[in-house]
Image (spheres, rainbow, N blue to C red):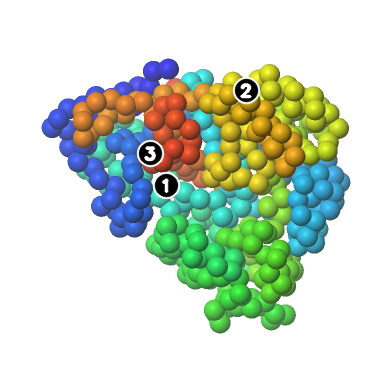
Amino acid sequence: MANEPVSALLNAELSRPDSPLRAIDPRQHPVLADLKRARYLSRPLVYPESELRAFGADLLGAVELLTALPKRLFDGDVERTCRALGLDPRKAELVGDFEARSPSRFGRIDAYHDGEALRILEFNVGGSVGGQEWVEPLADMFWADDAFREFGTAHGLHYLKQTKLLAGALRESAAPVTSGHDPVIAMVEGTGGLDLYAEGSWYLLRRLLQAEGLDCRIGEVHELEVTASGVRFQGERVDLVYRLFDLDQVVDDPDAWRTTVRLRDAHRSGQVALWAPLECDLIDNKRFLAYLSDPRLRGHMSQDERDLVDRVLPWTRALVPGAAGLDAVVADCRERREHLILKPDAGFASRGITCGWLVSDEQWADALRRGAAEGAVAQQRVVPREEVAVNVETGLTESWDACLGLYWVPGGLGGGGGRLVHSGEPADSTDRRLAPMFLYPDQGADRH
């Protein structure tokens, strides 16, 4: 499909050898400079605002459905929910009970635009979702360039400031604890987690939140002290714990387990705000997608809810070890090989996926056998529209596939950006680019 008209104008400008837009270098940004291995597209991704706003409304509706599934399907019973999702029963012990009110909405979806509409590939729920360290800085960097800002102003371009929206959501979440003052925030990884994940992400996110005026500390779960008098981190009283660790990081660590349980209880008693509550780790499960998509599993939904899901979510089926009807699901997936992607339940960051259109029948059958034995989700392939961009080094145009990471916060859409690979390459290709996302006003857009 042809690019959006504003994208075409950007490409035309970048095609001019003397265009000042060709000189934009994201590595000049003080935060982006620390992302040593990141590479960037020559232009932002742009979308009509009315489309993004309409999709955002459907996205929030889908998130509400996702959050409601444990109550609708399992009467809010944590143990039953974990059994159905194939989760370690010790996670049910950690979560305890579902909270009376839904936790603050925060997360990121991965989505493709198929040329007609945006389609959700998966939900990532909770504080540990990635990409926040570059989304707003990359958009800021483009907008700070005089030539790009002149172009953007002429065409009404604007963007959602992800870090600012997140900072506002954190203040709101902490408000019952702080009684009006800005929260002191502890960003907490699991034991050893900072060595694994923090260098290119969490420290940069902390810098961005500090730039929004928030007092943020960063460390690991063993540095938390939870007592009857409050929660301290590195010896200082804190109002909000920004949870970067997941339940897998604490189930086998007795000290971290005890601290996590105390933290959970302190949050529920109002001593501290927890971003995000432990139950988010149950919601963040690929099997739940089948409860939204599979006609045999979605009797809990109204027709309007089914229509909403069908607008945004591709055909999705769960391969649940030992489940009734598993052989039929596997047989159906074998027939659909060229149109399906298989994602292991335990996978993340594109790890362990099998693209049916890239493998042989025998390889696909092997992948399905593993998925049926270990747990996996099969999903209809979404073919992304091509995003054309000028390579400013060669002057040639190149085609890219863009996976959009779109965030949501309690107030609505929370910004986003794109991770791109050359068209037709798998999502885990080593040759990837990052791009900010801008919106432009179009007929039907409401800027108020």
Placement of 109 over or under 230, stated as above or below: above
Question: What residue did someone put label 1 on?
Answer: 135
Q: What's the residue type where badge 1 is placed? A: Val
Q: In which quadrant of the rendered view does residue 63 lie?
A: top right
Tell which of 441 and 198 is nearer to you. 198
Q: What's the residue type where badge 2 is placed? A: Asp
Tag in front: 1 or 2: 2
Q: Indicate the quadrant containing the N terminus: top left, top right, bottom left or bottom right.
A: top left
| Label 1: few (<14), some (14–19) or many (≥20) C-alpha neighbours in 10 Å | many
Q: In which quadrant of the rendered view does residue 238 lie?
A: bottom right
| Label 2: few (<14), some (14–19) or many (≥20) C-alpha neighbours in 10 Å | some
**Whole-percent x and y of residue 14?**
23, 30
- In the rendered view, does 164 fall on the left or right side of 264? left
Name the residue rendered at 75%, 58% in the picture: 91
Question: What residue did someone put label 3 on?
Answer: 431
Q: Secondary structure at mark 2?
A: helix
| Residue that lies at the very extreme toward the front in this rendered image | 362
| Label 3: few (<14), some (14–19) or many (≥20) C-alpha neighbours in 10 Å | few
Q: Earlier in the sequence, mark 1 or mark 2?
A: 1
Q: What's the residue type where badge 3 is placed? A: Asp
Name the residue rendered at 69%, 24% in the picture: 333
Q: Secondary structure at mark 1?
A: helix
Q: Which mark is residue 300?
A: none
Q: Secondary structure at mark 3?
A: loop
Q: Earlier in the sequence, mark 3 or mark 1?
A: 1
Q: For marks 2 and 3, give the CA distance.
A: 27 Å
Tell which of 81 and 178 is nearer to you. 81
**Whole-percent x and y of residue 197?**
49, 59
- In the rendered view, does 299 fall on the left or right side of 355? right
Question: What residue did someone put label 2 on?
Answer: 361
